[in-house]
Amino acid sequence: MITWLYFLIILLISGSGVADNQSNETDAPPNFVWITSEDNSKHYLQIFDPHGVETPNIAKLAQRGLIFRHAFSNAPVCSVARSTLISGCYGPRIGAQFHRKLKMVAMPDSLLMFPEYLREAGYYTTNNSKEDYNIHKTANVWDESSRKASWKNRKINQPFFHVQNFTTTHESKLHFTKSDMENQATKNLPEKVLVFPNHPQTDLFRYTNAYYRDRIEEMDEQVGMLINQLEEEDLLSNTFVFYFADHGGVLPGSKGYLYETGLHVPLIIHVPEQYQYLIEDFTPGDVDGFVSFVDFAPTMLNLAGVDVPEAFDGRAFLGPGVSLKELNSRNTTYSYADRFDEKYDLVRAVRKGRFKYIRNFQPFTVDGLMNNYRYKQLAYQEWLSLFRTSKLSEEQTLFFNPRLPEALYDLERDPYEIHNLATSGEMKAVLDEMRVMLSDWMNSMPDLSMFPEHVLIQRAFSDPVEFGQEYRDEISRYIEIANLATQPFSIVKDALSEALRSSDSWQRYWAIIVCSSFGKQSQTLIGELEHLLKNDSESINRTRAAEYLGLTDVQDPSEMLIAQLYGSSDAAEALLILNTIVLMKDHKGHRFNLEPDRIDAAVAANVEVSRRLKYLVPN
């Protein structure tokens, strides 16, 4: 492990040819402060978006620093995003991709959470105070992690890494009531704010936008107080200060979704004067290169002079060996969505430059599927009500309609991802390239989510990375079958039929899902699907077959789905069955007369299952 001697070596090898900068170099390591705000994408800060509000304290950090115009969370929700940050690993590779976790996983054998490397190198590490990891944390990660944690308790001259989380902009702050709306005026005028074009242009949406911008301004004041503390203690000259949001959000359709409003975060890094020499070609101002949360861990270690483990999935974007010129050439980021509380929807995405490719693996699962915590927000409730009463424009109904398996967006022309170009012949070359990029990335991990979550809990989560390597070939085959949905049915019919008859349960699983993605086009395979409904050894495959019959209006799946639910003794499996039941109820009009007492008691007691049951059986 490299320690403070590293900085003396850097000073010695830099040579006499940089005499102008030499006087600023130091053999002491820098300090680091992360200031994290919750649930806000870049769209609400004027420094990043003309429709945002002024945030003078956050902007102040950029005076001697860097404004990252393309910074991304790899996941659009707290625990998965924070697990990526702390581990430097993609969630679907290490089993940290589900929110909220039903079972925690261990860090890969070859890695530690990155603050532990800093502690080994002599740093004092503190977190105030949110963790929310899906990964087991050892006692060696933080010197202190609490609401009282501060750098102030370190030893004299000890370098520190401090995380300060502000919750002022969290989703829960938008759980106001109609009475609140009537009696609490906003500082930002509702008639002056931008309502996203895919949202209803209503008084409620305008108020929600204004109210949220007020929270952004309040958060900026908190950031200012923390910066003032650093200034008063004369720490800004030797402390890298990162300001960023923990993911996007939180207006409807943002948090929990792989759209830019859920992923594209603000990031500003104050570069202390004493350590500008660590950044090749440093000039304060904009950075156009792409960075994402998976890159933060290696970046921190690189700036601190600590060896960066090769097992990280990300790569450093600042520090020795990285120039701003090279950084600005980076133009790609990957993202993932799996389960958000009780709602499942497997989605993967890649953005390259101006283009964004989204792969909806279960495109029949509409974005707007009930998610209890999301729908505490009045704007969600109104949006759904307007949909059900046919009072939305075509753009505004997209959230509640089945999707295509693939989506392609030109973000320069379509920043809110409304116009899907995947079916445009003119975009075929771009679509083909990005489809291959995403599949290659999923294969490279490999992506554990090609197994249902309950299977991973049973078989993989004792050592997810090892499981992924052991079943790499099988996962590759599942991805291949799943991607049959991106080709014409006439071309893939025989391959689908073969997969439906496979002895591998999860080849059958993905083949059924692909049939549902094709909808009525695949009715020539209904014989195989009805056979699986009656005879498949896996309950979840029988569930998927029933789902197909309901989606295609061949048969009412209600009794079949209820039977699978009553027969399940696994909470994660039951949760996936309930996902289908809610889809069939809300978006296909089927009726379900559930008797909660007939559900396995341990299953019904699961917190996420109970959310679904509370919605389906409110009394």
Image (tube, rainbow, N blue to C red):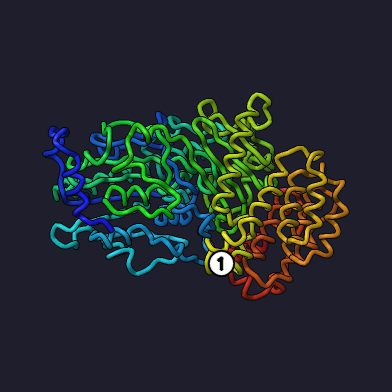
In x, y percent, where is residue 428? Answer: 65, 29
Query: Looking at the image, is 12 positioned above or below residue 509?
Result: above
The residue located at (39%, 56%) in the rendering is 86
In x, y percent, where is residue 218? Answer: 32, 44
- Residue type, mark 1 in image: Val
The residue located at (62%, 38%) in the rendering is 435
Quadrant for the N terminus in the image: bottom left
Residue situated furthest left in the rendering: 23
The residue located at (50%, 27%) in the rendering is 412
368 vs 513, nearest the viewer: 513
* Residue 534 left/right relative to 179: right
In which quarter of the view is residue 505 placed? bottom right
In x, y percent, where is residue 76? Answer: 50, 48
In x, y percent, where is residue 101? Answer: 52, 63
Residue pointed to by mark 1: 607
Query: Looking at the image, is 413 positioned above or below residue 16?
Result: above
In which quarter of the view is residue 326 placed? top left
